[in-house]
């Protein structure tokens, strides 16, 4: 009889937590225009708060990775959700722009970073020896699932009852997840008397070495592969969370779409991203990760280059499909390359800093999008710049020396397994 593995309870709890926490990241697309109308703040000022939040979100990655190694995923995820809840509650009572920077920019930024992709990548490495790419893809897809569930609902409730009702919706979801997370989450397989999924009765010499291999940050900073991964992930953040995640809905509204229609397209983008990220996780376990990343960045660049010319619903939906399939598809191969090159024991720390680079790119694009929208009257220059950077990322990942594919054990390892 096959015994149920507690890893799947951990996966389920992590998925729900990521859905609730990361849906918050997409909220600016819904509330930017209502904030402009109510408070009279211009889009550049609001976008700066989003940029600060994305930067704090990125900083929450390495902090989360450090605290996961020290205190375990359960405490870090609970702390992240509580910070998110505190920030959302503060937004309901804000009257000044600096309060938006504090609540959205810092508190929610750090909270979503702590309850984000870096912690989930560490969970996948701890609980799974096989299919790690697929699990990382599943966790990445949960971010899109959060958008799929919450963004249309937020758009509809904002139109009917104002932007605060959307914030209350997110606050309720975050608080609802805290209890099952605190009760059911476990930090490691040995906490429940089990081994990681796919792990045999005894570990081979190769597996023990794989688990123990670690590269200190100071050494990683001297290696070209770290900077290639960090630079390409900077482009990923610039072209995803920062630009599209923040400004797609306002851009679509200015192109003649209703807010609900734009949110629906964004929701479709999220749905396709679930498919694309899961497929990417499956492909990551089997094919050259560098070629996968080059393909993802190339298709993303082409879709962004076409976006300024989209004025009808059919074109917007086509963009959502093409772009959505590879939005977070970059995460599984990037995590896997980090683990393969630098050692699985280094993923929490090193991927945390690579993720920080991602969010620096996102923060710059979030603010620059609002700034150039005010300066030029549209987002077209930003979309072209994102397309160019996407092609630059193709060149960057092509120079990584490691494929990320699992190699068979050496003859020595096989003889001593």
Image: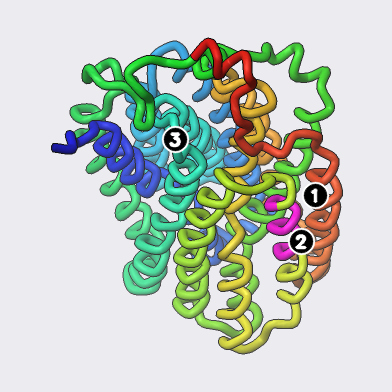
Number of numbered discs on residues: 3
Ranked by sequence position, the earlier of labels 1 and 2 is 2
**Residue that badge 1 annotates:** 393
Q: Of 413 and 91, which appears nearest the observer? A: 413
Mark 3 or 1: in front is 3
Q: Residue at x 46, y 53 (%)?
A: 141
Q: Position of residue 227 (x, y in %)?
A: 80, 31
387 horizontally vs 27: left or right: right
SS label for mark 3: loop
Above or below, 176 relative to 388: above
Q: Position of residue 408 (x, y in %)?
A: 60, 30
What is the distance, in whole Å, between disc 2 and disc 3 at their CAs? 29 Å
- State whether residue 247 appears in this view: yes
Ranked by sequence position, the earlier of labels 3 and 1 is 3
- State whether residue 79 appears in this view: no
Residue 297 inside the magenta-drawn segment: yes
Q: Of 55 and 157, which appears nearest the observer? A: 55
For the record, the magenta segment spans 292-300
Q: Of 367 and 394, which appears nearest the observer? A: 394
Q: Position of residue 263 (x, y in %)?
A: 48, 71
Q: Of 221 and 106, which appears nearest the observer? A: 221
What is the distance, in whole Å, between disc 3 and disc 1 at their CAs? 29 Å
404 horizontally vs 227: left or right: left
The answer to whether marks 1 and 2 mark residues whose Cβ atoms lie closer than 8 Å is: no
Q: How many other residues sit within 10 Å of disc 1, few (<14), some (14-19) or many (≥20)? A: many
**Residue that badge 2 annotates:** 298
What is the distance, in whole Å, between disc 1 and disc 2 at their CAs? 8 Å
* Colouring scheme, one of rainbow, by chain, secondary structure, one colour: rainbow
**Residue that badge 3 annotates:** 130
Above or below, 377 relative to 102: below
Residue 1 inside the magenta-drawn segment: no
């Amino acid at each position: 009889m096959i015994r149920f593995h507690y890893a799947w309870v951990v996966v389920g709890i992590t998925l729900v937590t990521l859905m609730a926490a990361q849906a918050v990241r997409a909220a600016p697309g819904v509330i930017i225009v209502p904030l402009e109308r109510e408070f009279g703040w211009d889009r550049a000022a609001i976008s700066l708060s989003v940029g600060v939040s994305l930067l704090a979100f990125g900083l929450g990655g390495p902090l989360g990775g450090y605290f996961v190694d020290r205190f375990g995923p359960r405490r870090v995820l609970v702390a992240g959700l509580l910070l998110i809840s505190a920030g959302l509650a503060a937004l309901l009572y804000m009257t000044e722009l600096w309060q938006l920077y504090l609540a959205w920019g810092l508190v929610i930024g750090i909270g979503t970073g702590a309850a984000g992709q870096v912690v989930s990548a560490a969970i996948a490495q701890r609980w799974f020896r096989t299919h790690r790419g697929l699990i990382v893809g599943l966790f990445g897809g949960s971010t899109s699932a959060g958008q799929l569930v919450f963004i249309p609902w937020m758009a509809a409730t904002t139109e009917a009852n104002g932007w605060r009702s959307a914030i209350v919706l997110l606050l309720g979801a975050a608080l609802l997840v805290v209890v099952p997370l605190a009760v059911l989450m476990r930090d490691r397989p040995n906490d429940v008397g089990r081994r990681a999924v796919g792990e045999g009765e005894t570990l081979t010499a190769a597996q023990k070495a794989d688990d123990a291999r670690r590269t200190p940050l100071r050494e990683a900073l001297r290696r070209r592969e770290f900077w290639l991964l960090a630079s390409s992930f900077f482009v990923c953040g610039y072209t995803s969370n920062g630009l599209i995640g923040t400004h797609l809905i306002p851009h679509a509204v200015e192109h003649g779409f209703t807010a609900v229609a734009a949110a629906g397209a964004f929701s479709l983008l999220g749905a396709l991203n679930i498919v694309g990220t899961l497929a990417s996780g499956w492909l990551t376990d089997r094919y050259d990760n560098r070629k996968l990343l080059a393909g993802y960045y190339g298709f993303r660049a082409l879709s962004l280059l076409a976006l300024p010319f989209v004025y009808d619903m059919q074109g917007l939906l086509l963009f959502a499909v093409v772009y959505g399939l590879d939005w977070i598809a970059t995460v599984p191969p990037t995590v896997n390359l980090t683990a393969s090159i630098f050692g699985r024991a280094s993923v929490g720390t090193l991927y945390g800093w690579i993720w920080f680079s991602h969010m620096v790119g996102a923060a710059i694009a979030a603010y620059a999008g609002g700034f150039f929208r005010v300066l030029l009257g549209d987002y077209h220059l930003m979309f072209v710049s994102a397309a160019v950077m996407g092609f630059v990322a193709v060149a960057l990942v092509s120079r990584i020396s490691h494929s990320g594919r699992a190699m068979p054990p050496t003859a020595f390892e096989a003889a001593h397994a």
